[in-house]
Amino acid sequence: MFYMAKLKVPIISIVIGEGSSGGALALGVANKVIMLENAIYSILSPEGYASILWKDASRSKEAAEKMRLTAQDLYDLKVIDKIISEPEEVNDEALGIISKELRKEILNTIEEMKKKSSEQIVEERYEKFRKIGS
């Protein structure tokens, strides 16, 4: 993550299902973090959190609420930058809609980043990471 943070190229992270553990930390070191509406993103599973905090993994639902691992929670905390809505029903058509939205967001981000110097990209990534949770 230390080296990743200093990369002079833009980094776009996308959470489409469950981003967790040490990989979740690495996903956060990005210029832009995009998350599907029903995905979750945390450094620890709710069961693990409950086991550590209360010595009782069966309290995972309570742990999940405290962890604030939903897309909306993480957007409010400034951990992620964009939420991609998902249709109610999951089918081929829904996947096509989601794919188009992701593609649009990726292309928009690339166009934004093309206008910036390498130094700006690194500095903005650093500042973004420092503001998480504020």
Image: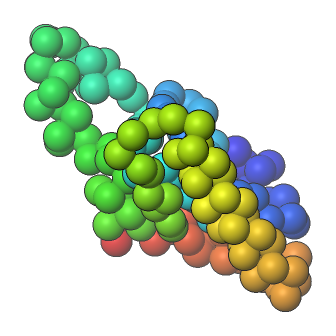
Which residue, as the protein is rendered here, is positioned at the far bottom? 115
In the depicted structure, whether residue 16 falls above or below residue 12: above
- The image quadrant that residue 118 belongs to is bottom right
Residue found 11% across the figure and 31% down from its top: 62
The residue positioned 86% from the left and 65% from the top of the image is 9
Q: Nearer the viewer, residue 41 or 90?
A: 90
At a point 17% along the width and 41% down the height, the residue shown is: 66
Q: Position of residue 15 (x, y in %)?
A: 55, 44
Q: Is residue 51 above or below residue 67?
A: above
Please provide percent x and percent y for residue 126. Answer: 64, 69
Q: Tell me, what colour scheme is on the image?
A: rainbow
Query: Relative to residue 62, is residue 106 drawn left or right?
Result: right
* Location of residue 11 by image quarter: bottom right
Front residue of 93/119: it is 93
Please provide percent x and percent y for residue 113: 79, 78
- Side of 116 relative to 68 (left or right): right
Looking at the image, which residue sits at the far front?
93
Q: Is residue 59 visible?
A: yes
**Total residue callouts:** 0
Q: Position of residue 67 (x, y in %)?
A: 25, 41
Res 14 visible: no
Residue 108 higher or lower than 21, as above or below: below
Q: Is residue 8 left or right of residue 30?
A: right
Quadrant of the rendering where the C terminus is positioned: bottom left
Q: Residue at x 49, y 59 (%)?
A: 84
Image quadrant holding the N terminus, namely: top right
